[in-house]
Image (cartoon, grey):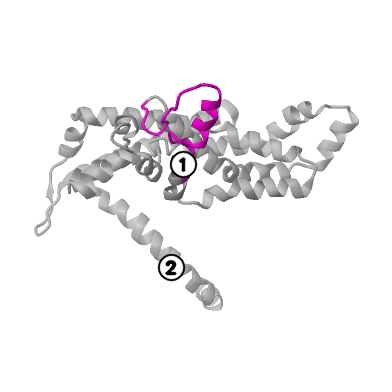
Amino acid sequence: MKKNIKRIKGDIVLYIMLLPTLVYFLVFHLKPIYEMKLAFFDFRIFESDVFVGLKWFGKLFSTPMFWRILKNTLIISFMKIFMFFPLPIIFAICLNEFSIGPFRKSIQVVSYLPHFLSWVVIAGVWFSFMGKSGAVNTVLGIFGIGPIDFLTSKDTIRWTLFMSEAWRSVGWDSIVFSAAILTIDSTLYEAAEIDGASRWMVMKKIILPALFPTMVTVLILNVGFILNAGLDQVMNFSNDAVLSKIDILDTYVYRIGLKNGQYSLATAANLFKGIIGAVLVISTHITSKKLTGKGAW
């Protein structure tokens, strides 16, 4: 104990710098876990909360709107997790194939930039790009295809969400895979070159096996967020014409909790989402361990 206290005193400046982060996690992450108990109580402003057991969960699951919203959430999350998952891997492998260093670095910088833009800015860009008078419809008009309003069409809005997410995240998410590629022993490439292996064989036999543990870990962690379909993105792309197709659990919680004041019901919905995510992470990890011998931990 004395040694630990002495070590803390020696690094007191670092601990002071860390203090705001610790306070942030305490207030916005640890305390909300304790406050999840509100899902089992009737919320009272001026009186003590009243324990009601599973009342709010029963009300949540008996609402027809909830099942429609859950379906929307699963569809959008499936598109973002499983259909999007190969894109950063392919992008990282393609970057690795560029032999011109400055050109590769330029592509990396440009691909990372959208990640640092807020969804408000990104939505504005895509409104201009995908609107009736936007660049996409201008090109389609050249080929005699009438204007399509991708942002108000129920048939295209989910694909618009997927493409905007890909535009924003492919470059940034590829960093972890690029880092994994850089850790590959260079002697493996030299041995493959001596054996006359093609670039395709190098990717198949060296790069992809080296990426496999990282791919498994990232996929398992992503599965845990399958009910997080992207509150910021959906709110910025929502409109009355497409709300029935992209209304998700997060927007439902925001609407019934912050706008309608049904805090207990909103907490129950959020707790349901958290439990499902935890169960999926653990089950995916166990399944991966049994099938491949690798998991998240």
Check disc 1: other Cα within 10 Å, few if <14, some if 14-19, many if 20+.
few
Q: Disc number at residue 243?
A: none
Number of numbered tags placed on the structure image: 2
Residue assigned mark 1: 128
Region in magenta: 125-154
- Residue 206's place in the image compared with 14, above or below, is above
Q: Which of 279 and 162 is in front in this view?
A: 162
Residue assigned mark 2: 20
Q: Choose mark 1 or mark 2, whichever is in front.
A: 1
Residue occupying the point 46% across, 41% down: 128
Quick one: SS at disc 2? helix
Q: Position of residue 280 (x, y in %)?
A: 42, 33
How far separated are the C-alphas under marks 1 and 2?
A: 39 Å
State left or right for residue 181 relative to residue 13.
Answer: right
Query: For the view shown, which residue lies furthest in the left direction?
Result: 47
Q: Position of residue 80 (x, y in %)?
A: 47, 34
State whether residue 220 appears in this view: no
